[in-house]
Amino acid sequence: MEKTFEKIGIIFNPEFKDSKTLAKKINSKIQNAKIFSIDNLKNDIDLAIVIGGDGTFLKASRFYSKKDTPIIGFNVGRLGYLAQAHPNEADFVIEKLKKGDYKIENRLMLKSKNKTALNDIVIKGQNCARTATLDLYINDKKLCSYVADGLIISTPTGSTAYSLSAGGPVISPNIDCFLIIPICPHTLNTRPIIIPSDEKVKIIAAEKKEKLNITFDGQEDFTTNNDIIIEKNEKYAKLLILNRQNDKFYDILKEKLHWSIAPKK
């Protein structure tokens, strides 16, 4: 049995027309719950129920990781890879929560400056119309120079997102590592690298005058002409995972990415 949650926040994304309706339905079945928008997140809760797509979940996870607040998602978006439940499973989820029939997973996060990411940090040249030359250092030792459209530094959780589209491997979230994936590199011998999560990654623009754009989970960004240092974040995202037959990482891969399904003739 897990802990009983005393203050539950039900967070909806107003960009999805059905999200607030679902939030009200869940609220009618839970005591001590509050409803608020993803644009107005509040600290004083001990469980976050998030209704939206993956972007909604990522924003909430970064916010609530600071307080070690568990988070569970209902997908009303397109893919909803990070969500645990479909909208028609509200009663099922509430029953699981009441029984304490779940577990909480720690998910590795990245940090750079004062910003964090659950999926990935992406570095590109400010001028997106041309390639950038990026020097990669691991623990202050230069490893290589990339001539590419950019670099993705991904967590295992993010390995099924932008990293996968760029040719990176799928990594189980219980492996403590980072992925470094070049985006459209100009040499065929350039390949993704997997490194331990306690390594320090530093990226420098080879052309000193070139500014770099850094994006966190595809949502927050800033531009700099200084070195970029990326490390493991001290806090983890706390994902609440329901106990059921298809709760394993590999089951979710098959469901969301349609693996093990033969192509139609």
Image (spheres, rainbow, N blue to C red):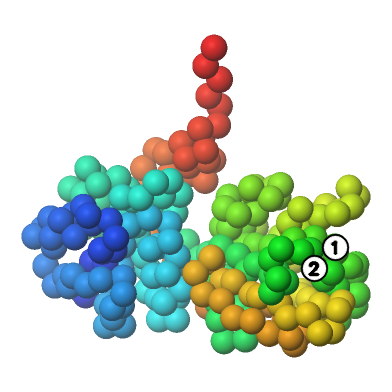
Quarter occupied by residue 120: bottom right
- Under circle 2, the secondary element is strand
Res. 35 visible in picture: yes
Horizontal and vertical percent position of residue 140: 86, 81
Horizontal and vertical percent position of residue 65: 45, 75
Query: Going 59% across and 81% down the picture, which residue do you hit?
Result: 222
Horizontal side of 118 relative to 85 (left or right) equals right
Res. 104 visible in picture: no
The amino acid on which the numbered mark 1 sits, given as a three-letter code, is Val
Horizontal side of 1 relative to 32 (left or right) equals right
Q: CA distance from mark 1 to mark 2?
A: 6 Å
Q: Residues within 10 Å of mark 1 (few under 14, many from 20)?
A: some
Query: Going 55% across and 81% down the picture, which residue do you hit?
Result: 115
The amino acid on which the numbered mark 2 sits, given as a three-letter code, is Ala
Horizontal and vertical percent position of residue 217: 54, 66
Disc number for residue 264 = none
Q: Give the vertical position of 122 relative to 227 (above or below).
A: above
Q: Which residue is mark 2?
A: 132
Query: Going 31% across and 50% down the picture, which residue do you hit?
Result: 76
Disc number for residue 147 = 1
Q: Give the vertical position of 207 relative to 153 (above or below).
A: below
| Tags 1 and 2 touching, CB below 8 Å | yes
Quarter occupied by residue 132: bottom right
- How many circles with numbers are drawn on the protein? 2
For this rendering, which residue is in front, 93 or 201?
201
